Image (cartoon, rainbow, N blue to C red):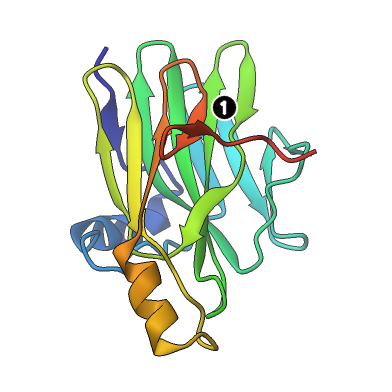
């Protein structure tokens, strides 16, 4: 099964912002998109401005998908029976970015655990078997030593969303928080 990657459908005024952001996706800080509504074939996701929580049909997720910084839709993927939205939380310098996949189907919506190494430099690719892979280097915060920055940068974190919705990091399951 092949997934098709598309920009998230948004309010018309945000289309140009999305297009500009997608053109620069290769740069480490090019992920930010000021989006409060993400429209898919199976429903609408919204970021509640007061709580900075992602909601589906006006209801928050359990456990919540709440941004430490700014939640935004990075990419939307379409399969015949589902849409998958890669949501990014852009925060501060201690942990610049974290990610969550939200899968929407006719039957309802599911989410993965929040994941990432804190790096905001991620490569995203789809596989012919319906997988989505997000690869990023390790990350060391601003208070870490130069040696720790070098060690972190040399580590690779490979997150794979399988067609059945399971998420792994370097081949090991990523558990959903309770």
With 163 as the anchor, is 101 left or right in this view?
A: right
| Label 1 secondary element | strand
**Residue 83 visible within the image:** yes
Instruction: Give left or right: position of 121 versus 128.
Output: right
Residue underneath mark 1: 43
Q: Residue at x 57, y 65 (%)?
A: 70
Q: Nearer the viewer, residue 102 or 93?
A: 93
Q: Is residue 155 above or below residue 94?
A: above
Q: Is residue 1 above or below residue 65?
A: above
Find residue 3 and report its image quarter: top left
Viewer-closest of 82 and 156: 156
Which residue is found at the position 77% from the left and 63% from the top?
50
Q: Which residue is located at x 65 percent, y 60 percent?
A: 67
The C terminus is located in which quarter? top right
The reply to whether residue 29 is in sight is: no
138 over 36 or under it: above or below: below
Horizontal and vertical percent position of residue 138:
40, 63
x and y, in percent, of residue 10 in the image: 44, 46
Q: Where does the image place residue 78, in percent across and percent down from the top left?
A: 35, 24
The quarter of the displayed image where residue 106 is located: top right
User: x, y (%) of residue 149?
Assistant: 39, 79
Q: Is residue 83 left or right of residue 1?
A: right
Position of residue 103 relative to residue 94, above or below, is above
Residue at 65 percent across and 35 percent down: it is 175
């Amino acid at each position: 099964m092949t997934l098709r990657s598309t920009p998230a459908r948004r309010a018309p005024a945000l289309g140009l912002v999305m297009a500009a952001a997608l053109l620069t996706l290769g740069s480490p800080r090019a992920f930010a998109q000021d989006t409060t509504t993400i429209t898919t074939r199976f429903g609408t996701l919204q970021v509640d401005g007061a709580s900075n929580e992602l909601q589906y049909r006006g209801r928050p997720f359990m456990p919540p998908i709440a941004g430490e910084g700014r939640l935004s839709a990075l990419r939307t993927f379409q399969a015949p029976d589902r849409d998958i939205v890669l949501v990014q939380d852009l925060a501060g310098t201690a942990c610049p970015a974290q990610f969550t996949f939200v899968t929407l189907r006719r039957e309802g919506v599911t989410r993965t655990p929040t994941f990432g190494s804190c790096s905001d430099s991620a490569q995203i690719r789809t596989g012919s078997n319906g997988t989505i892979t997000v690869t990023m280097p390790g990350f060391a915060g601003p208070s870490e030593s130069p040696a720790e920055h070098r060690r972190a940068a040399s580590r690779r974190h490979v997150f794979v969303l399988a067609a059945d919705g399971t998420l792994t990091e370097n081949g090991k399951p990523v558990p959903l928080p309770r």
